[in-house]
Image (cartoon, rainbow, N blue to C red):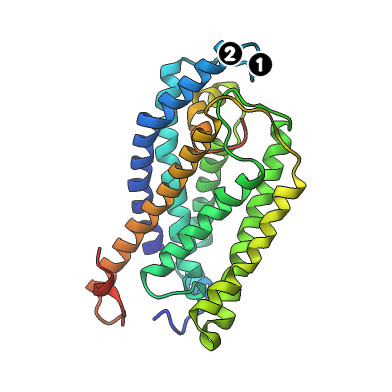
Amino acid sequence: MIVDSLKRGLAAGVVAGLAYGLFMALVGNPLVEHLEHLAHHDGSHGHDHSHAVSDLTTAIVSVGSGVLWGILLGTAFGVAYYLFEPALPGVGSTKVYVLAGASFLTVSGVPWLALPPVAPGTEQALATDVRLAIYGGLMILGATICVLSIAAYRSVQDEYGRFAAVGLATTPLVLCTIPIVLVPTNVLTAPELAGVFLWLVAFGQIALWAVIAGVYAWLDRRVDSEAPTLNDLDDTATGV
Amino acid sequence: MAETETVHDRIVHARSEVTPTAALMTVALAAALGFTLFFLQDPLAHDAMHNFRHAAGITCH
């Protein structure tokens, strides 16, 4: 069973990874190169890149990395979904989307509160090692927030209804202020288009998780409909 | 089937299905892939994945 779930996650990851690779090729690569170009012409600041490889290599490897990124996340998602499914709120596909949302917050969302995605040419105050440590710590914080949130939802859902449960589930989000308050301002100089870049990166990651969840849920429903012994409640109602 | 099961059941179930070796290999593969994409600072790897790391919001840059 866990192997089946892993396979579904892997398949979802391949689909999402290919889509993300395409996004890298069409949007990510040109945008990063363009911003880099701007930064280099802008003056002497920024991390000066003496490129160890050609631009073409960077472009190709970056697309490949995007595909692998999707596969890694999808596979991890499949395993996590099998293990945590009983604890997730909701019915049917809702569970898949809840876990995907929690995954996004853990892997990207919460860490970004302190260390948002930076455009090329940004000067950062903190050293790479320090940033990696902070990022890791914030991933743990993100996971903790999601667990608390889901636990809060489950504890009141039956007694007080869904709306009260959703309300209570938002309270752990106050922990999000920890990274905002405690991590010192990292970015020294933000280049042009930094804001646009941030939202594009965020869009990319959210879309990646949405595709993983969508494909996973679809595969899951298909398996369920082939095995009518499983009493599924809302399969046909949710559609594809 | 989901109604009565708990996370603990799932872990027990998974343990009976998957050998420790297979589980370890899967985790090791995932860790290797994650390390390469996220953390590897070797100039060759770093520069080759440069665009990806920026576009995915990975901080080691």
Question: Is the Cβ of the residue at disc 2 closer than 8 Å to that at disc 1?
Answer: yes
Left or right position of A160 against A175: left
Residue A42 marker: 2
Residue found at x 45% / y 35%: A65
Residue placed furthest toward the bottom: A159
Label 1 chain ID:
A
Q: Residues within 10 Å of mark 2 (few under 14, many from 20)?
A: few
Above or below, comparing residue B8 to residue A184 in the picture: below
Above or below, comparing residue B12 to residue A22 in the picture: below
Left or right position of A1 against A153: left
Rendering coords of residue A185 (x, y %): 73, 37
Q: Nearer the viewer, residue B12 or A136?
A: A136
Report whether residue A19 is seen.
yes
Above or below, comparing residue B50 to residue B24 in the picture: above
Label 1 sits on residue: A45
* Amino acid type for the residue under numbered disc 2: Asp
* Amino acid type for the residue under numbered disc 1: His
Residue A3 marker: none
Rendering coords of residue A32 (x, y %): 48, 25
Callout 2 secondary element: helix
Rendering coords of residue A1 (x, y %): 39, 68
Q: Quarter of the image for the C terminus of chain A: give it.
A: bottom left
Q: Nearer the viewer, residue A188 or A238?
A: A188
Q: Nearer the viewer, residue A211 or A71?
A: A211
Rendering coords of residue B6 (x, y %): 52, 79
Mark 2 and mark 1: Cα distance apart in space: 8 Å
